Image: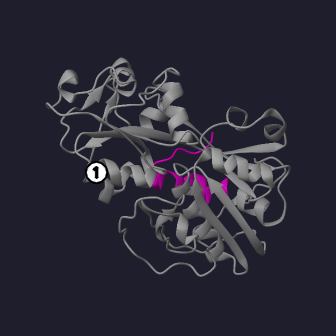
Amino acid sequence: MLNGTRRIGALAIAAAMLAGACSSAGASPTPAPTATPAPTVAVSPSAMDSAAPATSAPAAAPTVNCVAGTITAAGSTALQPLVDAAAKQYVAACPGSTVTVNGGGSGTGLSQVAQGAVQIGNSDVTAESKLATPDAAKLIDHIVAKQGWIVVTNKDVTVTNLTTQQEIDIWTGKTTNWKDVGGPDKKIVLIFRPASSGTRSTFKKIVLGGKTEATGGQTLTEDSNGAVTTAVGSTSGAVSVIGFAYYNDPANKAKLNGLQLDGVDATVANMTGGTYKLSADGHMYTSGQPSGLTAAFLDYMMSPAIQGTLIPSLFYAPVK
């Protein structure tokens, strides 16, 4: 049950979903499967994350708590495919409702909701880890899913598994050639996310143990999970980290090499079972108790339609 909201009864999905999800400005554009957008979903053209996974949902008759109005959710691009798909379903069932979903990274989403610029801040990390105490204290956390990330390389890298120590050595710049970890004689190209990124913060905390990443050598920076997906697929020797939802999209998976971590497959089952460690909660923050359309949409995120159907279809795990 979300803070200050009512749990909606059993729901079903009413509309076929669109392919892809929008993200932060500056994402490298890559054509995604096209579909006719639901007319009440507002998508910022400058925030399109075209490498986000294509999604679809079975049609059924819904019972949705429809509230008219306009809201914006922004932040995490790892969580974005889920929130964007849920928004499309909600507004398809509720004429008069507009839910805009933008990227920008967890830090951006948290800052914007704290400033009142958006109604929901999507984040892979807690508000306390990104904001000053006064700003974080006024936000209310709504955990809507559990999400995982996978280390991916370009297809020309034949490595299948990296240990935590090997990851540390690679990302801190100690290991600079794939041959040193059983791969080809090829320079390692690190593709980072900005400092505001929740994906980067989560990987640094869980896998790197907080160690400082390399700043020189072969490095690039991309501003969303979708842009990283594109960059890794097109850059020889590249390595980075993306959300399960991006990796498991067939179009993306075909051009990436997904790695085990410490010999454990990056799967939802292993994540929920506790054997795969690169995972975290998906947060949707509001400034104070939500009301109106914000409250209704957050309730919808916790409904059976999302928790029981949409979440597993996009390779997230439901809230327990």
Q: Nearer the viewer, residue 238 or 31?
A: 238
Which residue sits at x=83%, y=65%? 292
Q: Quadrant of residue 91?
A: bottom right
x then y, percent, for residue 179: 17, 26
Q: Nearer the viewer, residue 30 or 256?
A: 30
| CA neighbours of label 1 inside 10 A, class few (<14), some (14 to 19), many (20+) | many
Q: Which residue position holds label 1?
A: 233
Amino acid under label 1? Gly
Magenta segment includes 265: no
228 sits to left or right of 211? left
- Asked whether residue 308 is in view, the answer is yes
Which residue sits at x=34%, y=33%? 265
Q: Magenta residues?
A: 301-320
Which residue sits at x=47%, y=34%? 271
Say if 143 sits above or below 177 in the image: below
Magenta segment includes 303: yes
Which residue sits at x=53%, y=22%? 210
x then y, percent, for residue 227: 41, 54
x then y, percent, for residue 58: 48, 69
Furthest-front residue in view? 216
Furthest-left residue in view? 185
- Asked whether residue 248 is in view, the answer is no
Q: Quadrant of residue 106?
A: top right
